[in-house]
Image: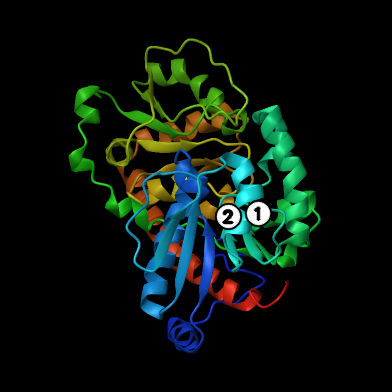
Amino acid sequence: MNVDTLPQSSAIDPAPASRALSATMIDPLSFAINGRFLTQPVTGVQRYAREITAHLDELLHQQGGQASLYLPDSSDVPAYRAIQARRSQRLRGHFWEQMELPLLDRRFLLNLCNLGPVARSRQVVCIHDANVANMPTSYSRAFRAVYGTLLPLLVRRAAAITTVSHFSAGELARHLPIAREDIVVLPNGHEHVFRWNASRSSIRTKHRFERPYVFIIGSRARHKNVAMVLDLAQALDERGIDIVVTGGQSSIFAAEEHRAPAPNVRFMGFVDDDDLAALLQGALCLLFPSFTEGFGLPIVEAMALGCPVISSDQASMPEVCGDAALLAPPDQPAAWLRHIESLAGSDTLRSTFSERGRKRVEAYSWRKSAQGYLDLIRERRSGKA
């Protein structure tokens, strides 16, 4: 497959907007959404669920459909127009998802964050990656146990399984009892970054960024491979370059211990979206050194804001990046250092990859993927009982 083309599902051919609109006027959709993601910290998986749901709401409003979104507590809910939020607070977490959610609504159910109730067959489940199988040491024992038990049951029972890249589809088929051709690819989008506003951020002034810096977004989970970049700190310091790291340590990940940081390394912790925009727009480049990812959302976020990207050449990253990023093996720090030096030494090269990135992200649209979900639900809702 040519990775420079828009990834399309091998299981569904999304209808043109006009045809989809005509169909929904005759047969308006009505379904349920697992809203547990609104109770969780926002990482890439939750961002996917939030953005897909927001665009589903817009499309349903335009096409005359409706949905109910169920969540297990009183967390704030965005102002939807065609989606009605419903709270059920007797249980929490996995217990709510597995025991309470299946009883709340008998309509077709959409699950966007890896899991869903195994008691249901009339549902779609988006499983974002096979990272827990590909790099189990990156995850806690409890997380591995839950996913190892539930995912095989879900892929056997669900009416449809989706994922976010062709690489991820292949890996899920390798590790779970499902054929590759039965997995629908509906990737991440990029449009959310245009709601971010760097002018509202004071982070770069507050922290006095006086030298060029490379930027990393991600937790300290082992598969994120942040340690490799930190090992370059001294070499980068000698070249007058800092390292800025944002993100935190989720409880699902096994801890990755790092040595005391060099003086040119800044750990910023979690930052808000406006700060993230300011950091990306001011960076020499984004570094994305992961060993494995289902998609790699920070790549398209950086590209959409004109930030050049140096990415791992493994897993989903070449598929997402195409020719719009510099690629390097995640276990060869010298190659990363050479790429950083090249960008630092050439305004022309930085401009070239900035423009390629902006063009590349046009292939990744939340709205297109949301329409893909509506088409998929319409197709599968009358299937398995």
Q: Residue 271, image x and y in percent? A: 34, 32
Report the side of 47 relative to 124 (left or right): left
| 203 on left or right of 187 | left
Alpha-carbon span between mark 1 and mark 2 = 8 Å
300 and 174: which is toward the camera: 174
Name the residue tied to disc 2.
319
Front label number (1 vs 2): 1
| Label 1–label 2 contact, CB within 8 A | yes
Residue 147 x %, y %: 70, 42
Depth check, front residue: 133 or 351: 133
- The residue under label 2 is which amino acid type? Glu
For the C terminus, give its image quadrant: bottom right
Q: Name the residue under label 1.
A: 167
- The circle on residue 282 is none
Work out whether residue 4 can be spotted.
no
Placement of 314 over or under 376, stated as above or below: above
In this rendering, is residue 124 above or below 101? below
Residue drawn at x 69%, y 39% as measured from the top left:
132
Local SS, label 1: helix
Residue at 44% over, 62% down: 366
What residue sits 51% from the left and 30% below the top? 219
Q: Quadrant location of the N terminus?
A: bottom right
Amino acid marked by disc 1: Phe
